[in-house]
Image (tube, rainbow, N blue to C red):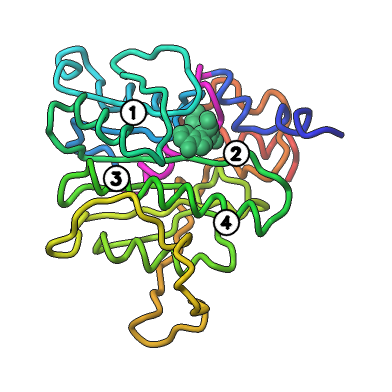
Amino acid sequence: MGRSSKDKRDIYYRLAKEEGWRARSAFKLLQLDEEFGLFKGVKRAVDLCAAPGSWSQVLSRKLRGKEEKSEEVKIVAVDLQAMAPLPGVTQIQGDITKISTALEIIRHFEGQPADLVVCDGAPDVTGLHDVDEYIQAQLLLAALNITTHVLKPGGTFVAKIFRGKDVTLLYSQLKIFFSSVTCAKPRSSRNSSIEAFVMCQNYSPPVGYVPNMSNPLLDHSYDVDFNQLEGPNRIIVPFLACGDLSAFDSDRTYPLQATLGCWPSRQSCKEKAISQTGQ
Ligand code: SAM
């Protein structure tokens, strides 16, 4: 059975269709917000690697909310690919590894820093795990670099991460810039996937830090295995399963009727699904 036929049975895929989200990933950002209150007080937000745009949809719906608030809110979405327009979202078709993209974001915010940067970036997976993890790490570091150009002190950065064997190096990099780093796994992210999200709060770069686009994973002067680091050099990042624990399990198959009229009262919805499956 092909991947697409499995995806069609997935409860979050069906919920996304019903609620008009462009991708099931919308629920990952919604569940991260449930846990961390991501959107509180946010007026300027950047969505890196945004296409087809479900995270930008979440930002647009959550931040702009009522009409009177929508004027003050600015949202910028960046992707290599073009995406269909969204209310209140400015699109930049560009590469997040390029300084020109950072400058374009700053231009759009008229020199004001962003309150929140999110990145759901993923390369086209090759199926070779080491290669996929490496490329994903590159993308995360590119997102971090661009974030250091545009985020306000105290701001929040959220990004997809693959919890592979070199993840400690990434945590160490993030901890240089944020006082709080948590690894979070929303219910809608499949347990079978090594995908998780780093929740980096309170942006506080080292004194004198000058934003740049350099990348330590490409700096071959590293000859240390970061997993061997000990003491204060080894960063332990807390891991948190997040989202409403009564929400649907993304690895389970539910009957087709299970989503009907279910969101957002997921508790009763899940109970209904369980009574239908008898599990
Ligand atoms: N968050 C999106 C949503 O909810 O609709 C889904 C993002 S999709 C998983 C990953 C995206 O990363 C792709 O659209 C891809 O084009 C983008 N991407 C990968 N490398 C990129 C780069 N260097 N610069 C900009 N976008 C990139």
The residue lying at 29 percent from left, 42 percent from top is 38
What's the residue type where badge 4 is placed?
A: Tyr
Horizontal relation, residue 132 to residue 98: left or right: right
Residue position for label 1: 59
Q: Under tag 2, what secondary structure?
A: helix
* Residue 264 in view in this figure: yes
Q: Is residue 110 magenta?
A: no
What's the residue type where badge 2 is placed?
A: Glu
Which label belongs to residue 134?
4
Q: Position of residue 79 (x, y in %)?
A: 45, 28
For the N terminus, the image quarter is: top right
Q: Position of residue 144 (x, y in %)?
A: 35, 50
Which mark's residue is nearer the viewer, 1 or 4? Answer: 4
Which mark's residue is nearer the viewer, 3 or 2? Answer: 3
Residue position for label 2: 271
Q: Mark 2 and mark 1: span between their CA atoms?
A: 29 Å
